[in-house]
Image (spheres, rainbow, N blue to C red):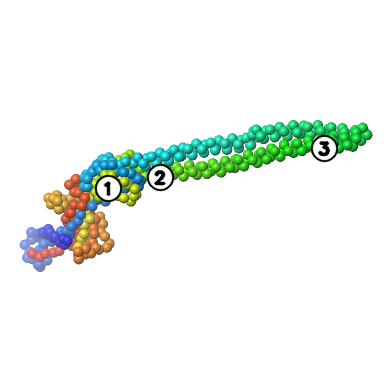
Amino acid sequence: MMKKVVIGLTLILTISGCSKEPVKNNEENVTKVETTQVVEAFGTVKSTDVKTITIDFMTVVSKINVVEGQRVSKGDVLVSLNSQNYLTQIRNKELDIKTLQIELAGLNRDYETKRSSLEKSADPEIMRYINDQKHAQVLLSKALEDLKARESLYAAGALSLKELNEYQQTVKDKEKAVADAVFSEENTRKRIQQEIDQLRTSIDQKSLQVTSKELELKAMQEKMNKSYIQGNEIIADVSNGVVTDLGCTQGDIIIDPEKKLLSILNKDSVLIEANVAEEFIKDVKIGAEVIISPDADKSRTYNGKVLFIAEKAVLKNNETTIPVRISIENPDDFLLPEFNVGVKISFDSPKVDAKE
């Protein structure tokens, strides 16, 4: 761990006026010394945008098109897949939904037909019993008129009691015919209403099945609806990325949703993670200017600023340091993730007076 404070001296001379008066005291002719200091430390280039590529449906890796550390651009094919089995499951689910929807449409038609026929008394059985009632009522009315006439004849002695009683039974039979027709109509209405209720229950159940299947289908489709999945291919969805953590090989059967195929580091989103020795952390401030030098090429320098200072120290290799994050304000293609760098963090110090 580099633990160094570099001190630069800037001399600012204070010149007295052109007077012939003698020097009165030593304080009249002094040099102002302003110190410029930096804290040096080591760090590593880190990507702040690391995308982990996972597949949470069954598929087969048919081809690996990249290698570890390869640079990729948006749309580049990383891995080719064979997802035929999963696509077949999706199509079967779609067919199940269509079948259920057809069945549901039939139930709705039957429901509306029966409901309308009941409300309008248009059901053939109901219409028949209504007609039976009308006919029986006509016959009953005529029989009642005839009964009155026979009662008059009986009162006049022109009709025997036996004949009168026989006709009274005929009237009762006519009344029963009317009651039977009414009863049959009511029973038919009850039966149709029960059928309507059963249809309503079946419709509700079928609707729930359709909804459930649609949710299942949506979940299956959403598993493939990701920015890095395009048909049977895994593609890069960043403009400037680097392949890392390649964890699959050709022929792998992916059934574990937690299995990582690979990761993509976004080179356009990088910063420096450095560790500052505890004795110098007091001089490091948020926003401080930083000069960054990669170990891979010391002639290159980058500018940055302190973004973050951890509130907790870290003990490693018997050294106590504080993690610091530093921005990179002029990154380029040379500066790669995981590069080691040296950083110089500037800080101000009070001016001091030096007597001549």
Please state which amino acid type lies under the numbered disc 1. Cys
- Vertical position of residue 210 compared to residue 351: above or below: above
Please state which amino acid type lies under the numbered disc 2. Ala
Describe residue 342's horizontal placement relative to residue 93 as left or right: left
Q: Secondary structure at mark 1?
A: loop
Question: Which is more toward the observer, 147 or 325?
Answer: 147
Q: Tell me the residue at 30%/42% (across/down).
A: 81
Q: Residues within 10 Å of mark 2 (few under 14, many from 20)?
A: few
Q: Secondary structure at mark 3?
A: helix
Q: Tell me the residue at 73%/34% (across/down).
A: 133
Describe residue 261's horizontal placement relative to residue 206 as left or right: left
Q: In the image as oriented, which residue stretches furthest toward the bottom?
A: 25
Eye-nearest disc, 3 or 2: 3
Instruction: Please say whether residue 235 is visible from this viewpoint.
Output: no
The residue that mark 3 highlights is 169
Image quadrant assignment for residue 79: top left
The residue that mark 2 highlights is 219
Eye-nearest disc, 1 or 2: 1
The residue that mark 1 highlights is 248
Eye-nearest disc, 3 or 1: 3
Image quadrant assignment for residue 229: top left
Q: Earlier in the sequence, mark 1 or mark 2?
A: 2
Q: Provide residue 195's location: percent of width, then percent of height.
A: 60, 40
Describe residue 203's horizontal placement relative to residue 47 as left or right: right
Q: Residues within 10 Å of mark 1 (few under 14, many from 20)?
A: some
- Vertical position of residue 323 compared to residue 87: above or below: below
Q: Provide residue 332's location: percent of width, then percent of height.
A: 19, 46
Give the number of marks. Answer: 3
